[in-house]
Amino acid sequence: MSKLIIIDSSISDINLINNFIKVDLNDTYDSLLLKIESLNISSFHYLNIVKGNDSLINNDILTVNNVENDDPNLTSWENIINFFNNIRLIYNINKININNNNLRNKDYNYIIRKLNQNSNIYTSNNDFSENLLLIDSRLNDINADSDSITNSLTYYTDYIIFNYFTDTFDTIYKDVVKNYKSIGLAQHNYFKTYYQFVNYQTPSMLFDVKNNYQRMSELHSLKNFLEGDLKFELTY
């Protein structure tokens, strides 16, 4: 069974991909259906949507930032969801992957969870990721246009930006939707003599640790979070 990819025309190197249709500025969802039909393939096992902006069709703008607050029921996604449902039925598609690196992890996870409330067929590009980076929001240049932390990550690395002052282990865990092979932490301790992963955590003292390991005892809660909640096995 074949796979189909629908690609935003702003994506480069699309000619290297087989079984794709390109979305042009004047396209509609109906014209996309005709383009798919022109491939003369009766069924597709898998559909991948590769997007470079906040819409697939030029005049159909999707809410993709702060989605849980601004569009909790995905009202702006109604037309594209109807399009997905149509091609699912016509071509017996089993999986639909929405690939857009412009979406923040939190928004991605919320959108996929909402889409899967009635059918567990939607995935996102972070389903293929193997690594997770937890980023303290106090760091500089997290989302700058170039030379930033997020822009330097590989395709197979997801990230979660957490707020040191307001987040807890539980709120961070809500944004994690899968297990990872490796987990990293980007954080600055600002030359303190103690360490706190997040503000609510009891400080772990960092001086004379060699002679008094108990000063680090509060790091056990971070260890438990990584090994228990995130299912990541720490190595020493």
Image (cartoon, rainbow, N blue to C red):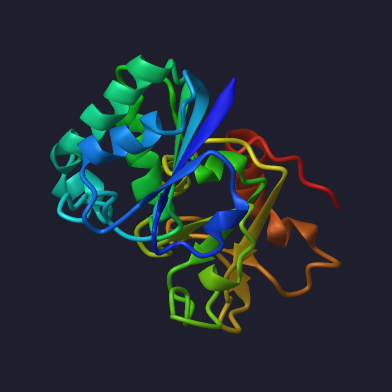
Q: Is residue 164 above or below residue 188?
A: above
Q: Residue at x 63, y 34 (%)?
A: 228
Q: Quadrant of residue 209?
A: bottom right
Q: Position of residue 203 (x, y in %)?
A: 55, 63
**Relative side of 156 to 84, left or right:** right
Q: Is residue 74 above or below residue 99?
A: above
Q: Residue at x 56, y 35 (%)?
A: 178
Q: Residue at x 67, y 45 (%)?
A: 130
Quadrant of image for the N terminus:
top right
Q: Is residue 89 above or below residue 75?
A: above
Q: How many marks?
A: 0
Seen from the viewer's position, the closer of residues 185 and 109 is 109
Q: Is residue 55 above or below residue 31?
A: below
Seen from the viewer's position, the closer of residues 144 and 202 is 144
- Is residue 132 visible to us here? no
Q: Position of residue 142 (x, y in %)?
A: 47, 74
Seen from the viewer's position, the closer of residues 47 and 181 is 47
- Is residue 93 visible to us here? yes
Q: Quadrant of residue 180?
A: top right
Seen from the viewer's position, the closer of residues 179 and 48 is 48
Q: Position of residue 4 (x, y in %)?
A: 49, 34
